[in-house]
Image: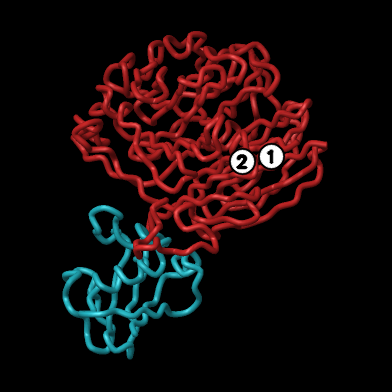
Chain colours: A cyan, B red
Amino acid sequence: MILVVLPAHLRSLAGVTGDVKLEIDGPVTRHSILDALEARYPMLRGTIRDHVAGERRPMLRFFACGEDVTHESADTPLPEAIASGAEPFYIIGAIAGG
Amino acid sequence: MSNVRLLVGTRKGAFILNSDGKREKWDVSGPHFAGWEIYHMKGSAVDPNRIYASQTSGWFGQIIQRSDDGGKTWFQPGTPAGAPTTSPDGMPMGESNKFVYDTSDETGKPLTTHQFYDGTPHPWEFKRVWHLEPSLDNPDTVFAGIEDAALFRSTNGGQTWQELPGLRGHGTGSQWQPGAGGMCLHTIILDNNNRDRIFVAISAAGAFRSDDGGATWKPINKGLHSQYIPDPNAEVGHCVHHIAKHPSNSNVLFMQKHWDVMRSDNAGDSWTEISGNLPTDFGFVIDVHAHEPETIYVVPIKSDSEHYPMDGKLRVYRSRTGGNEWEALTNGLPQENCYVNVLRDAMAVDSLDSCGVYFGTTGGQVYGSADSGDAWRPIVHDLPPVLSVEVQTLT
């Protein structure tokens, strides 16, 4: 089971409170997490990555085990702690404005 | 007795204001979609409980919301409340937020680039929906004006969207460039006397008309004069801020341009200036009285670099002569230390016998007049900055 922490706006959009729990078969990557997230919560399609090209929206970042994995390949396997659910995968909005 | 429902979009959510026909006491609900920018909401003329909303965010992109009960509950049309979130074959159903430019060989070519602020070619990039215009006949058909400028249509209640590519592809698209607010298609007018006729306006490209239901388009900017562009009389490139039309007449249009208030008596084929005695003819909103086709309203703003009323006095100007002769309406509006703006989609009129006029400000006030503008009062005064105001007259 994978744990995903969403920004507050996306939690309200998806109608969830707290961490999102996902089951993923196969390698746990950013790609597979987002696929599973969007399959479970279709209303999030297009809010994290572009509908068509699948590219990350520019003001979002991804963190795993305290590391910024935003600019790593979406198909890079994430740490075991993410895959086991010991640590959550964070999707956060980049800080902008003052 | 008739009721009135105001749909107010703000920088931090949507608000719905309800009143009876007296328009003295208002019930305020909201914020809906708290924290999100609500660029526009509009209800269907044939099913007033059907309301569409554009919910958007610089972080999370575009969401289309729909209500079928007058704004009490909302859902994304691709994922109806309570319905399965996936199709029988397991595919996600959240298509309602998807706006993809038509690049097909059949209808979408040639679509290349538009101009960026510096005149260099720039690819079309979807950013947000500025305006939603429900069909006059079918509640499931709705048009969307988007940034970067294009016109989309849904015929299934907002579940899926298709571009009407004839607008971007008619020939001048590569010359369009953004205004200060982005390159947005912000005005969509459907003609209730001629269902094949559609007007749109784009900042900063100009006005366009289709006479075949949106298949083909032509620029309608003759007579516009804009000193801030290389050719002041160019076919396109004008920063049109808003256009208004009275339902009774297919040919008379009123325009608030960046500078200049204009009118056309031939469906946009040519325009003449009607700024007359306005203290400044810069502004964003313009609207027409519900029962008097030659009575129009603007809110003059000091200049393109000072987006607030002149002298700190918030004044609506009304012309009962179709332009040129204007009177200041000040009763109930702040006449000192007022430095708010009124954005282009933030004025609306109801259709009660005594026409109500409403507008919202960037200071979070929504002002209303139940007597055609003679007297005003704040309905609410501490909302987030108001982006849009629409009104529904409910019988």
> Who is closer to the viewer here, B20 or B357?
B20
Label 1 packing within 10 angstroms: few (<14), some (14-19), many (20+): some
Q: Secondary structure at mark 1?
A: strand
**Residue lying at 45% horizontally and 23% vertically, measured from the top left:** B199
Q: What residue appears at the point 36 percent right and 82 percent down from the top-left corner? A: A3
Residue B131 placed where, x, y %? 48, 38
Q: Nearer the viewer, residue B288 or B137?
A: B137
Q: Chain of mark 1?
A: B
Q: Are marks 2 and 1 in contact (CB under 8 Å)?
A: yes
Task: Please give the residue where the numbered disc 1 appears in the rendered image.
Answer: B367
Q: Amino acid at mark 1?
A: Tyr
Res B389 → quadrant: top right
Q: Residue at x 49, y 37 (%)?
A: B141
* Residues at marks 2 and 1, CA–CA distance in whole angstroms: 6 Å
Q: Is label 2 in a helix, a strand or a loop? A: strand
**Amino acid found under the numbered disc labelled 2:** Gly
Query: Residue B256: which numbered mark, if any?
Result: none
What is the quadrant of the N terminus of chain B in the image? top right
* Residue B16 in picture, x, y percent from top left: 65, 49
Residue B360, label in figure = 2
Of the two numbered discs 2 and 1 on the same chain, state the one appearing first in sequence: 2
| The C terminus of chain B - image quarter | top right
Which one is in front, B372 or A32? A32
Q: Position of residue B269 (x, y in %)?
A: 42, 10
Relative to B330, residue B161 above or below: below
Side of B284 relative to A56 (left or right): right
Up/down of A85 relative to B305, above or below: below
* Left or right: B340 in relation to B204: right
